[in-house]
Image (cartoon, grey):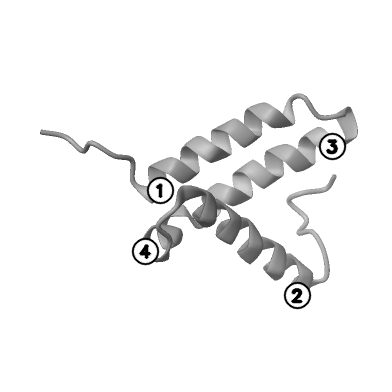
Amino acid sequence: MGRSFLSVRQGINIIAERWARASRALRREDKAYGRETADLAKMHASEAFVGCDIPLEGAVFSVGVELGKREEEGGRPEKYPF
Protein backbone atom coordinates (compact mmCIF):
# COMPACT_ATOMS: atom_id res chain seq x y z
CA MET A 1 0.00 0.00 0.00
CA GLY A 2 1.11 3.54 -0.70
CA ARG A 3 1.13 6.59 1.45
CA SER A 4 -2.24 7.96 2.46
CA PHE A 5 -0.96 11.49 3.17
CA LEU A 6 1.37 14.01 1.59
CA SER A 7 4.83 14.63 2.98
CA VAL A 8 5.80 18.18 3.92
CA ARG A 9 8.09 18.29 0.88
CA GLN A 10 5.23 17.31 -1.45
CA GLY A 11 2.96 19.86 0.21
CA ILE A 12 5.54 22.62 -0.24
CA ASN A 13 5.80 21.82 -3.95
CA ILE A 14 2.01 21.99 -4.30
CA ILE A 15 1.93 25.35 -2.48
CA ALA A 16 4.74 26.70 -4.68
CA GLU A 17 2.85 25.62 -7.81
CA ARG A 18 -0.27 27.44 -6.56
CA TRP A 19 1.80 30.55 -5.80
CA ALA A 20 3.29 30.41 -9.31
CA ARG A 21 -0.22 30.20 -10.83
CA ALA A 22 -1.41 33.05 -8.61
CA SER A 23 1.50 35.22 -9.74
CA ARG A 24 0.08 35.21 -13.27
CA ALA A 25 -2.82 37.32 -11.97
CA LEU A 26 -0.49 39.98 -10.60
CA ARG A 27 0.30 43.23 -12.39
CA ARG A 28 3.05 42.99 -15.00
CA GLU A 29 5.65 44.62 -12.75
CA ASP A 30 4.85 42.20 -9.89
CA LYS A 31 4.68 38.91 -11.80
CA ALA A 32 8.40 38.25 -11.60
CA TYR A 33 8.34 38.70 -7.83
CA GLY A 34 5.47 36.24 -7.52
CA ARG A 35 7.29 33.61 -9.56
CA GLU A 36 10.47 34.23 -7.60
CA THR A 37 8.61 33.77 -4.30
CA ALA A 38 7.26 30.44 -5.54
CA ASP A 39 10.80 29.38 -6.50
CA LEU A 40 12.17 30.44 -3.11
CA ALA A 41 9.52 28.36 -1.34
CA LYS A 42 10.94 25.21 -2.93
CA MET A 43 14.61 25.96 -2.29
CA HIS A 44 14.66 24.48 1.23
CA ALA A 45 11.84 21.96 1.00
CA SER A 46 14.12 19.10 1.99
CA GLU A 47 15.38 20.89 5.08
CA ALA A 48 11.87 21.97 6.05
CA PHE A 49 10.83 18.31 5.79
CA VAL A 50 12.94 17.65 8.89
CA GLY A 51 11.67 20.43 11.14
CA CYS A 52 8.20 21.43 9.97
CA ASP A 53 4.93 19.54 10.28
CA ILE A 54 2.83 21.82 8.08
CA PRO A 55 3.70 22.45 4.39
CA LEU A 56 2.84 26.16 4.56
CA GLU A 57 5.17 26.53 7.52
CA GLY A 58 7.94 24.91 5.47
CA ALA A 59 7.29 27.17 2.48
CA VAL A 60 7.36 30.33 4.60
CA PHE A 61 10.51 29.08 6.38
CA SER A 62 12.25 28.59 3.04
CA VAL A 63 11.29 32.03 1.75
CA GLY A 64 12.41 33.58 5.04
CA VAL A 65 15.82 31.90 4.89
CA GLU A 66 16.44 33.13 1.36
CA LEU A 67 15.26 36.68 2.10
CA GLY A 68 17.52 36.77 5.15
CA LYS A 69 20.47 35.70 3.02
CA ARG A 70 19.72 38.43 0.51
CA GLU A 71 19.45 41.07 3.18
CA GLU A 72 22.83 40.04 4.56
CA GLU A 73 24.34 40.13 1.07
CA GLY A 74 22.98 43.63 0.53
CA GLY A 75 20.18 42.99 -1.92
CA ARG A 76 19.09 40.72 -4.70
CA PRO A 77 21.68 38.46 -6.31
CA GLU A 78 22.68 39.01 -9.92
CA LYS A 79 20.63 36.07 -11.16
CA TYR A 80 17.43 38.05 -10.41
CA PRO A 81 17.97 41.30 -12.35
CA PHE A 82 14.39 42.55 -12.04
Residue with the mark numbered 2: 72
Q: Residue 23 lies in what quarter of the image? A: top right
Provide residue 53's location: percent of width, then percent of height: 40, 57
**Which disc is residue 50 wearing?**
4
Q: CA distance from mark 1 to mark 3?
A: 26 Å
Q: Label 1 crowding class (10 Å Cα cut-off): few <14, some 14-19, many 20+?
A: many
Q: Is residue 63 left or right of residue 52?
A: right
Residue with the mark numbered 1: 9
Amino acid under disc 3? Asp
Quarter the N terminus occupies: top left
- Give the foreground label among 2 and 3: 3
Nearest the camera: 22 or 67?
22
Element class at badge 1: helix
Amino acid under disc 1? Arg
- Please tell me which of labels 4 and 1 falls first in the chain: 1
Residue sitting at 76 percent across and 59 percent down?
Answer: 77
Q: Is residue 46 above or below residue 24?
A: below
Element class at badge 2: helix
Residue sitting at 89 percent across and 35 percent down?
Answer: 29
Residue sitting at 37 percent across and 64 percent down?
Answer: 50
- Give the foreground label among 4 and 2: 4
Provide residue 20's location: percent of width, then percent of height: 64, 33
Q: CA distance from mark 4 to mark 3?
A: 32 Å
Element class at badge 3: helix
Residue with the mark numbered 3: 30
Provide residue 46's location: percent of width, then percent of height: 41, 56
- Give the foreground label among 2 and 1: 1
Amino acid under disc 4? Val
